[in-house]
Amino acid sequence: MVLNINRLDFCKKMLYNVFTMKDYKTRRVEYAEWGWGRAVPYFCATTLHHSTELIRLERGEGDIYINGEKYALKKGNLYIVRPLTLHTYRPTSTNAPVVDFVKFDLRRLAENSSQIGNIGDYLHFLNDKNAPCVLYGDSIRYNADKLIAPLFAENNTREQTQQAVFNMLRTLHEHRKFAESGTITEERQHFAVQTAVEYLTSHHTEQIKISDVAQLMGYDEFYAMKLFKRFCGWSIVDYLNGVRTIKACELLEQTKDNSRQIAEKVGYQSASYFNRQFKKTFGITPSEYRSNVKSEHCKV
């Protein structure tokens, strides 16, 4: 079986706070990073960062989870991920979504923006839990392309980018929900899932029980599993298997260890169970993966 190596090149770099998506092209300036990426067909790790990220669907099918809410990815919509907000993708078919994204350091971008429209006046809005995470293209009063397309124009001048961001923030403000602010419970849930994701990533080599994760989150097992899946799109067990199999890819490339040795290093007690989980995730066995990696290197 021939594996699409490019697909796994970015898959293996998706782990929370350790790996980032690599199958994209990107351009960076001091206040922004533009790029595109394809969601991993079988496992996308949950992540967060300090930037404000804007996302639009280019092609493919899937969902995006933002702060515990699931949204169907649809062309024409703008998806907004606020700083330090848990988010991830979940493909809904083999046609995994390809997205354009831009990450802004809005405080830097806001400098000297008053002549265009003071971005700084809206920065507090990023902490407003009632602000929408999605601007639906068909709900925007004027042409959605005129609002969204300039945000992803990587060759814009700083002033043009400032104008595009100002228009976006102003529209977000117009579409905000008038409701009570986020509760302490919601903040606690976010922190609990963030803690669980960090724990599963950094302790994946250990024998982890659902009860351990639930205790760490501060909830009973049933609620902890339900909450984790709501934020991450995966069960705790499936997420842990995803972390382990992606780490296994790295060891298959960088070492000569056999499957049993690699299984032990990434936290599996059984080599046969490791082989089954690896094939479930990537569609091939560990030995087939290693053979394909070697053949790709020979071509280079």
Image (cartoon, rainbow, N blue to C red):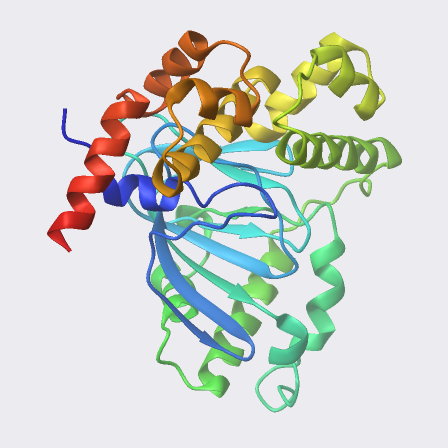
- Residue shown at 60% from the left, 52% from the top: 175
Horizontal relation, residue 241 to residue 209: left or right: left
Residue 234: x and y in percent read 53, 22
Quadrant housing the N terminus: top left
Considering only vertical position in the picture, is 249 above or below 149? above
Considering only vertical position in the picture, is 142 above or below 294? below
User: Number of labelled discs?
Assistant: 0
Residue 274: x and y in percent read 44, 15
Considering only vertical position in the picture, is 31 above or below 124? below
Residue 77 visible from this viewpoint: yes
Residue at the extreme right: 184
Horizontal relation, residue 152 to residue 216: left or right: left
State the residue in front, 27 or 106.
Answer: 27
- Residue shown at 43% from the left, 17% from the top: 260
Considering only vertical position in the picture, is 187 above or below 51? above
State the residue in front, 219 or 289.
Answer: 289
Residue 233 visible from this viewpoint: no
Horizontal relation, residue 296 to residue 136: left or right: left
Examine the image and state in which quarter residue 39 appears.
top left
Residue 268: x and y in percent read 53, 16
Residue 112: x and y in percent read 64, 90
- Residue shown at 27% from the left, 33% from the top: 290
State the residue in front, 39 or 110.
Answer: 39
Examine the image and state in which quarter residue 124 appears.
bottom right
Examine the image and state in which quarter residue 300 appears.
bottom left
